Amino acid sequence: MEDQQPAAVIHTTGLTKHYGKVQALVDLTLDVRPGEIFGFLGPNGSGKSTMIRTLLGFLHPTSGSASVLGLDIVDDSVEIRRRTGYLPGGIALYDSLSGADALDYLNDLQGTPAVRREELCERLQMPASVLRRKVRDYSRGMRQKIGVIQALQHDPVLAILDEPTEGLDPLMQQAFYSLMDDLRDQGRTTFLSSHVLPEVERICDRVAIIRSGHLMALQNVDDLLARRKRRVSLRWRGAAPELSGIPGLADVKTDGDRMTATLLGDVSGFVRAIASPSLVDLTIEPARLEEAFLEYYAGDDASEEVRG
Amino acid sequence: MNLRLLVQTLRWNRVRLLILMAASFGWGMLMPVIYVAFGDAFKGLVDSGVIPAELMSFGSGNFFTLSGALTLGLQHPMTIAFVGVFAVGSTVAAIAGERERGTLEVLLARPLSRRTIYLTVATAVTILISLVILALLAGQVAGVAIQGLSDELDLVQLPLVFVNGLLMWGAFAAFGLAASVTFDRHAPALGVTMAYLLVNYFLEILGSLWRDVDWTQQYSLFHHFQPGSILTGKVDLFDFGLLAVAIGAPVAFALIVFPRRDLAAPS
Amino acid sequence: MSLVVDSVSKRFGPVLALDATSFSVEPGHIFGLLGANGAGKTTCMRIVLDILRPDSGSISWQGRANTDLPRRTWGYLPEERGLYLRMPVIEVLRFFAALYGVPAAQATAEVGEWLERFRIPHYRDRRVEELSKGNQQKIQFIAAILHDPEVLIMDEPFSGLDPVNVQLLKEAFLEMRDRGKTLIFSTHQMETVEELCESIAIVDAGRVVVSGTVRDVKRAMGRQVVRLATEEADGGDWVEQLPGVTLIRRGEDYLELQVRDGADPRSILAAAIARGERVTRFEIADPSLEEVFIEHVGRPAAVEEERHLAGSGRGVDR
Amino acid sequence: MSGLFPNAWTVARREYRQRVQTRTFLIVTAVLALVGVGIPLLPVAVRLIAGDETTAVAIHSTDPVVQSQTVVALGAILHGDSDGTRWEITAVGDAAAADVRVRDGDLDGLLTVSRAGDGELAFDMLTEAGPSSQWLFAVRQATTQLSIGDRLVRAGIDPTAAGGIFAPTPFEVTPVDPDAKSPEETYGAAYMMAMIMVVLTFMAVLTYGQWVAGSVAEEKSSRVMELLITAATPRQLLSGKVLGTGAAGLTQYAVVVAAAAGGFALEGLVAERVLGDGGSASLESVNLWVLAPFGVFFVGGFLLYATLYAGLGSMASRQEDVQMATGPMLMVGMVGYFAAFIGLNTPEAQWVQVASLIPFFSPYVLPIRMLLASIEPWEWLVAGGLMVAFLFGALWVAARIYSAGVLLYGQRVNFRAMWRAVRVNR
């Protein structure tokens, strides 16, 4: 089992978790494949953290089963934790330790050599001078970096990261993204939750969206992108071009010689149709995943019963 | 047992431990001094009737004999406040406190079973309490030596007093640790444990002040810590056995409950 | 008259948290205050709010110094969120309203409206601790605006919120602006800034490195970006022959081109069509704020962290 | 800076309601009130229960003379004891049977008396009672008396003369003020009362001071503070906090003290009803109205401590740090407490007089002087003036610490850093 990768790094079957009457997870079945970056999305309180904590054995499933790296989450949770790295959402650290001591301590408890520590500290710009300081003196962004480093320093096969870029400024976000790209290239698997959709679009291969504990969608990011809408605006001189036959064009608003619309899917038909000499100005904005996601997100707020 | 966790847990308590050990040592030293200085004066005061005789006899301690004075030192409310708050405070903070600070989640993410975590913390607590009791006894021995009363004290019995004390405080600590792994928040765990401590103390005091209900003492763990008897050579194995049970029950409870609990529920 | 921050400096021990920081915010605008971790944003906000006093420099709103303004001028949403967890939502909100002198009846009515708008009217009598992070955030926003402040200052208001809640909050922002309020907020999510803000300031190491309207700031970069994809993956070497166009990135299925100021991006599309390329994607964009940000602030962050640490614990940006 | 009110009032009201409405507060108050009523009534209950019970001690001796003498003499001494215990002293012939009865619990003890070779009486008590038992103590004292009488007889002194030897010496104390109650009559009760007052003051200051500090730290750890500090000035928040939490504490305190006072008031009545005899109400002899002016000092002292507790509490970011941060106040409080305890025995000493004027100590020491000594009017004025001055001073200092402390997060409590912050800010 050590060397051969199981077919699914995370595999859940009908995973269900109730807190009293509240259903935090309902019949969740999904697979995370080796070597992918899997995005786990959902509104606040939809059960994301419950899922992660169940996978790591902090919570016990009400029914259903799950395995991580081929190990059962109830029986082998110690072994699972030995092979994974975990970044809790809104991580709290031991204030009285220095950054380096906190990393040492957590790594000693992990029991696996911190082979990536130096590389991570360099890429996330945590020089030794900073690591010498007490965690209590750290800013939010620095705590978050320590959190990322402690989760990845022992080079785990699987990293589970709960809102990893929370509190990181754009520079550090970039550094984190490139880190993720490298992990994927090295065949590591990452399971992460995030609220920042452009970020998900940028780094994730596949995403699952849950709401009120129910799995709403499980898709390739590329497939989602195919459903994206672009905002186009154009201006022309003279007669308006004929736009009615263009597939995917909607919400057409005309204001004098200016027109705005949304365009779903392929732009080639649209570009051909408008390529006339009377075109003065054309803007096609980059597509956003937001609309595609929001479709799954919207709905009742019952999920808010569960805090997470 | 995880050595690293043990060392770190002890380290986190080191400042408190050192302060407490120093205080315990000083307090222990004070008792023989008080015995020499005031033993007779207090006796006079009691005989005169100004202070009710009941107030002068907590547990089995009194100022009129050296062993009584030492016992008083070990069972004085001050000692109970010292050691009790420490034993209870540090154990309760062990799991519930870490949960409340939010650091439990990073700890749980390590490949340590809950049993390992529990046993490690329990070991750490045992070491901490032992050190405090040792400091207290060392203080008493030092005090006795300073006062030149060494021949009145049977040093051979001291290890037994230590074991007896460790068992009694261990029983409260075991209760505190069980509460710590049962509750998510620090306050209720502390509340339950303090209540347990106070009920025990109340039963002991009630029985000693009011002779008609001295049977209540039987039900107090404090009553089964008898340094006075041990110092005078009378060792009741029943006390040791009972305290061992009082430790065993919460430990067993914790070992069963802790691994099965949902921890770090969404907050 | 606008909010004017005029060469404000604040030193915490050896660290200069703000170094002659100056910017101004037009009334009725939404203003983004951007900067890396530890750049001095929070200190700046606290000084504007008169929680901290600057070593030198001044702040004025509508021509009056902030030290003379009543506290109800401002609404504040701090970065580290917190409410009285054990109290019912309505009571927490009434309490904060009362501190600003808002009558209880008026506060109650307005709370009702806002809860409705945020789609959480049924949480009115629940204890705060029963609410999710997102909903607590909404309550905190309501707490910041119940007294009808003229200027609303918010530190990372969107962090940790899911897209739906972000959307609701954005709508609330726009609503406040439509009521004539001035909004200032900080965030690390550049997309949000692009969407909401009329103008921004980027703070770096306590100094404002660039400020102005979003359009001006972007244009000041002196370039535009075009992303082009065609059905024939021919490498697109022809593009580089076009005047004023540079190929900056070869994506998996598209080319990213930089168009120098003065050149016409549409010439690329025209050239492509003239060559008979079947264009599948064509996007014209100003440089993203992210690019602007990185260009202005992008230097070893270790320097920032050092600054932060040296000044930590003295109320600096945390 | 705007005035204290109405914001201090708003904060205080919230603080008070929040605390008083919690279940913990209600339960603790109820339990303490029960204890308050119970303690004064406890002696009555003890006598009620003990009243029907007799302590049965059998006397055995191989020497019938010694036996009968012991029964008579011991009986006389023990019955003469005033604590109301009933004794049943009997002679038994069959030691083995009596032994069994002791083990069965029929007898409380079997006292075997023998005369040693040198003529000394020797006693051996077989009993289940522990060494700390009161009745055993009484018997032991009685046997001592018996032995001494026996020795006197053996030394050739007439037993009737022996009574005279132990008779008390006449000693009268004449008070200067003939209207005052004889100190002897009330001193014991006043002494107890003063002791109770000291302990109660200490508990109030310690417990409720901690509440105030804790609630400030809680606002910091829950991060409400940043919102509060933009809505109100540090002085408003601080005084609101002290007033609200303090009032909640004093509410609990008042309930408990009222319950205890009720218990004391009822003690005599209950004793009369239940026991038939008049009993002796232990505190009736003390004029409690003496304590009325003390109420002012109690509240003043309490506010003084609570204000400083709030200031220091603002330095802690977490509940666990509160103890550390408020350590200095604990020390000051302890000094007052111990001073008061020592002062109990020397109420007229000059240092006690000085201590009773110092605001930090006056709440502890004043009741002692009120109950056990006399206070001149100028002393009231000085003590009161100092109290008011210190209160304002404390508010100023605490508000400074507070406004600097509330925004310090995650720091270890460090007084040097604090001092710098106090100087830098505002």
Image: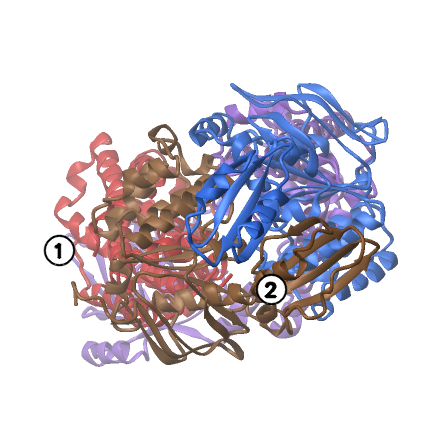
Chain colours: A brown, B red, C blue, D purple
Viewed as shown, does residue C284 lie left or right of C170? left
Q: Nearer the viewer, mark 2 or mark 1?
A: 2
Where is residue B244, by image quadrant?
A: bottom left
Q: Identity of the amino acid at label 2?
A: Gly
* Residue D127 located left or right of residue A27: left
Share a chain, discs 2 and 1?
no
Q: Which residue is mark 1?
A: D117
**Residue B190 on image: x %, y %:** 45, 58
Q: Secondary structure at mark 2?
A: helix
Q: Is residue C178 left or right of residue C123?
A: right
Q: Is residue D168 above or below residue D354?
A: below
- Tell me where residue A15 appears, x and y as whole percent: 40, 78
Chain assignment, label 1: D
Q: Does the rendering let one see residue A97? A: no
Q: Residue at x 26, y 73 (%)?
A: A75
The amino acid pointed to by label 1 is Gly
- SS for dot 1: loop
How many residues crowd around disc 2 within 10 Å: few (fewer than 14), some, or many (20 or more)? some
Task: Determine if residue D253 is in view.
Answer: yes
Position of residue A72 measured from the top left corner of the image (x, y, whole percent):
27, 73
Q: Which residue is mark 2?
A: A269
Of the pair B195 and A221, the residue shown nearer to us: A221
Q: Exactly how many numbered labels are in the figure?
A: 2
